[in-house]
């Protein structure tokens, strides 16, 4: 019996099931990455951006691979009790939900954008989105949207303030089906 899948489904299987080139278990290669992070981070284990930059620039990993390696480094390597070679790697990906971000620009309106969180599953992503400590690192306004460009043309540069209270209300009503792995949206 043959099962047909489309290209997006195949790519998702490669990311979620096999975790790309890294695999889905801790190998000696992954241990070397963990040891490399030990040397480079020098007790700055909670500096996420520094760790991800090291993995991407020094080891040539993609952002998604770096997120997975770094989160497993924090949860498995730093808390290890003996040899962890052969243990399963936990999946971590960047999930996002597309929505209209409420903003104030000499009035109130909505602009297209997205909210991103790093999570181990869609359910975990929903939980993190619902409990999101709103920061501008996790909210992205689509500056290429028609409305944003028209506002920029009319006003000639402006400051945007995100209406946190309204965004909280919108995010609390998000359904699991609306949350997608970030990679999926690039191919749609």
Image: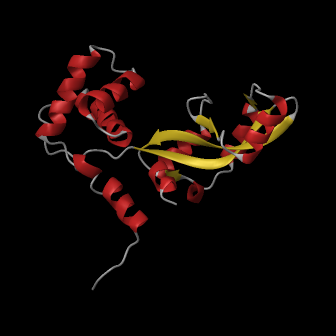
| Image: 29 above or below 21 | above
Q: How many marks?
A: 0
Q: Residue at x 35, y 65 (%)?
A: 10
Using the image as rendered, state which of residue 19 and residue 148 is in the foreground: 148
Q: Position of residue 33 (x, y in %)?
A: 20, 31
Q: Is residue 67 left or right of residue 130?
A: left
Residue 153 visible in rendering: yes
Using the image as rendered, state which of residue 100 and residue 78 is in the foreground: 100
Q: Position of residue 181 (x, y in %)?
A: 47, 51
Most extreme residue toward the right is 107
Q: Is residue 160 left or right of residue 44?
A: right
Using the image as rendered, state which of residue 103 and residue 75 is in the foreground: 103
Q: Residue at x 48, y 58 (%)?
A: 187
Please state, as top left, top right, bottom left or bottom right, where the N terminus lies in the image.
bottom left
Q: Position of residue 84 (x, y in %)?
A: 15, 38
Instruction: Find residue 62 and report its image quarter.
Output: top left
| Image: 22 above or below 107 | below
Instruction: Find residue 49 and report its image quarter.
Output: top left
Q: Position of residue 31 (x, y in %)?
A: 16, 34
Q: Is residue 172 left or right of residue 117?
A: right
* Colouring of the image: secondary structure
Residue 79 visible in rendering: no
Q: Residue at x 74, y 47 (%)?
A: 146
């Amino acid at each position: 019996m043959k099962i047909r899948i489309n290209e997006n489904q195949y790519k998702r299987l490669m990311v979620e099931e096999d975790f790309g080139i890294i695999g889905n278990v801790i190998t000696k290669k992954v241990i070397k990455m963990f040891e490399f992070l030990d040397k480079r981070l020098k007790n700055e284990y909670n500096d996420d951006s520094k760790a991800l930059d090291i993995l991407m620039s020094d080891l040539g990993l993609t952002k998604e691979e770096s997120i997975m390696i770094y989160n497993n480094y924090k949860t498995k390597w730093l808390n290890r009790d003996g040899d962890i070679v052969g243990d399963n790697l936990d999946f971590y990906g960047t999930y996002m939900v597309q929505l209209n971000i409420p903003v104030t620009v000499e009035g109130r309106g909505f602009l297209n954008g997205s909210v991103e969180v790093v999570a181990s599953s869609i359910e975990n992503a929903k939980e993190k989105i619902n409990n999101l400590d709103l920061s501008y690192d996790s909210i992205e306004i689509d500056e290429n949207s028609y409305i944003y460009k028209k506002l920029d043309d009319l006003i000639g540069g402006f400051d945007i303030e995100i209406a946190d209270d309204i965004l909280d209300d919108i995010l609390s009503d998000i359904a699991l089906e609306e949350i997608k792995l970030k990679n999926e949206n690039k191919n749609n």
